[in-house]
Image: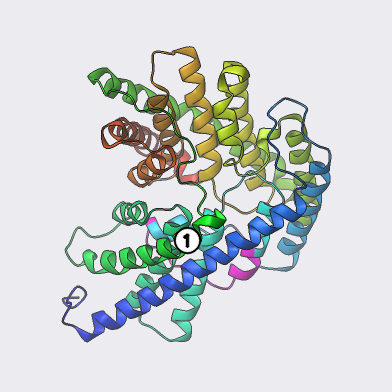
């Protein structure tokens, strides 16, 4: 182990070469996935749904989501497709079995093109991590090199997707690892792979494949001591939101359980029901990045009640999609949920700066579920474009939400992430 972070060691440079190579592979594979996903959405979505009014969703959504449900169900019926624990690979240092990857990625691609309330982070992580694991095993790399290579592959994919290698490095620092200088050997390799991934996505910036950068742009505000106190309260407010999601998961899980042995019926029915929900409440359609700026810009017209309705029904759509067998990640839909609640808070209490309310809730809600609060804080800063001083309450809110759910309520959230 003494040579794990020895820059004069040939073994370490071989490990770095594999890590950077697979980081490149991971980034390219993620970019291809996003490209295909975007193309599929343009083909099957006749136009972007930008109307938030109730009962204004077009009826073709029902047909699209039902057909997508049928295809996903068939994939589940005849393949090993499953929701692979990509966050576990990064945070808990788990292994990633490459065998279910192809069918799982295909099911996820159909789920995202079908407009379900899921994000592409799990999909790209499965693809990149699965390729990294498969190549490592084919080349018969040792276990330590394989682990670093898989982390590097996912780092390359996610730093491009989230438009930030810094957020990916923070995520690695929040993972379970020995507090030793040896870990910096892994961090250096994965961090350089993250830079490669960011560079590849940034090169295609004109095609908008890295679409979270500057998604919302609230005005800056003057930070006061009261803002820091308020950020604690906003972090606490995120906890019941996630508890509602946990309860939804349990309810959906029990309702869908009799259909788990019949995946075709399960996913087809789920697509139909979630399609009907999208017709009634169009903001439940898609991962949320398209609706988020529209809802934010028209928050005053929408009103507090509907903003809360949009947040809660997005949680229903996310939980339903996951339990009916669709594959994708929770972060992007939860960012939408947080933005709606942040806008609602600003509508109720106009004296609270919108940048504070948005930033704190957008990061606290997902941080209460996914155990990477500081990385999510960095992601929220990128999305909103906060200054260094305005970013401090965001980090506080994330840490408060994370500490409560993963400290006092760990069993409930760990089981459902």
State the residue in front, 408 or 349. 349
Magenta residues, as a range? 91-105
State the residue at coordinates (39%, 30%). 360
User: Is residue 102 shown in magenta?
Assistant: yes
- What secondary structure characterizes most of the magenta part? loop
| Residue carrying label 1 | 201
Q: In this rendering, would 125 be left or right of 236?
A: right
Helix, strand or loop at disc 1?
A: helix
State the residue at coordinates (51%, 73%). 131
Q: Is residue 205 visible?
A: yes
Percent position of residue 208, x then y: 55, 53
State the residue in front, 188 or 76. 188
State the residue in front, 250 or 348. 348
Question: For residue 192, which quarter of the picture?
Answer: bottom left
User: Is residue 73 shown in magenta?
Assistant: no
State the residue in front, 78 or 9. 9
Q: Is residue 100 visible?
A: no
Question: For residue 363, which quarter of the picture?
Answer: top left
């Amino acid at each position: 182990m003494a040579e794990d972070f020895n820059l004069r060691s040939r073994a370490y440079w071989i490990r770095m070469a594999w890590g950077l190579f697979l980081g490149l592979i991971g980034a390219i594979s993620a970019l291809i996935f996003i490209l295909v996903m975007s193309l599929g959405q343009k083909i099957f979505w006749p136009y972007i749904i930008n109307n938030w009014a109730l009962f204004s969703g077009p009826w073709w959504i029902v047909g699209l989501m039902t057909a997508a449900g049928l295809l996903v169900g068939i994939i589940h019926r005849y393949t090993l497709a499953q929701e692979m624990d990509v966050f576990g690979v990064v945070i808990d240092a788990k292994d990633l079995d490459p065998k279910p990857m192809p069918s799982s990625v295909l099911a996820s691609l159909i789920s995202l093109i079908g407009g379900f309330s899921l994000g592409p982070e799990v999909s790209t992580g499965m693809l990149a991590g699965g390729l990294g694991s498969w190549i490592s095993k084919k080349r018969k790399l040792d276990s330590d090199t394989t682990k670093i290579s898989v982390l590097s592959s996912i780092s390359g994919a996610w730093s491009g997707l989230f438009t930030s290698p810094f957020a990916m490095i923070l995520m690695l620092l929040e993972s379970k690892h020995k507090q030793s200088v040896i870990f910096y050997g892994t961090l250096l390799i994965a961090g350089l792979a993250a830079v490669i991934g960011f560079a590849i996505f940034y090169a295609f910036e004109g095609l908008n494949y890295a679409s979270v950068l500057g998604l919302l742009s609230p005005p800056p505000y003057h930070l006061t001591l009261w803002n820091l106190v308020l950020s604690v309260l906003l972090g606490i407010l995120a906890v019941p939101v996630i508890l509602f999601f946990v309860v939804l998961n349990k309810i959906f899980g029990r309702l869908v359980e009799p259909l788990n042995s019949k995946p075709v019926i399960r996913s087809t029915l789920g697509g139909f029901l979630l399609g009907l929900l999208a017709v009634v409440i169009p903001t439940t359609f898609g991962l949320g990045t398209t609706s988020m700026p529209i809802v934010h810009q028209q928050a005053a017209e929408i009103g507090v009640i509907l903003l809360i309705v949009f947040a809660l029904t997005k949680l229903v759509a996310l939980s339903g999609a996951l339990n009916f067998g669709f594959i994708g990640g929770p972060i992007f839909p939860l960012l939408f949920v947080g933005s709606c609640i942040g806008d609602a808070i600003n509508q109720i209490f106009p004296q609270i700066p919108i940048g504070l309310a948005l930033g704190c809730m957008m990061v606290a809600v997902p941080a209460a579920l996914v155990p990477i609060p500081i990385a999510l804080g960095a992601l929220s800063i990128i999305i909103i474009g906060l200054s260094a001083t305005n970013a401090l309450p965001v980090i506080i809110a994330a840490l408060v939400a994370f500490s409560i759910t993963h400290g006092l309520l760990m069993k409930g959230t760990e089981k459902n992430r």
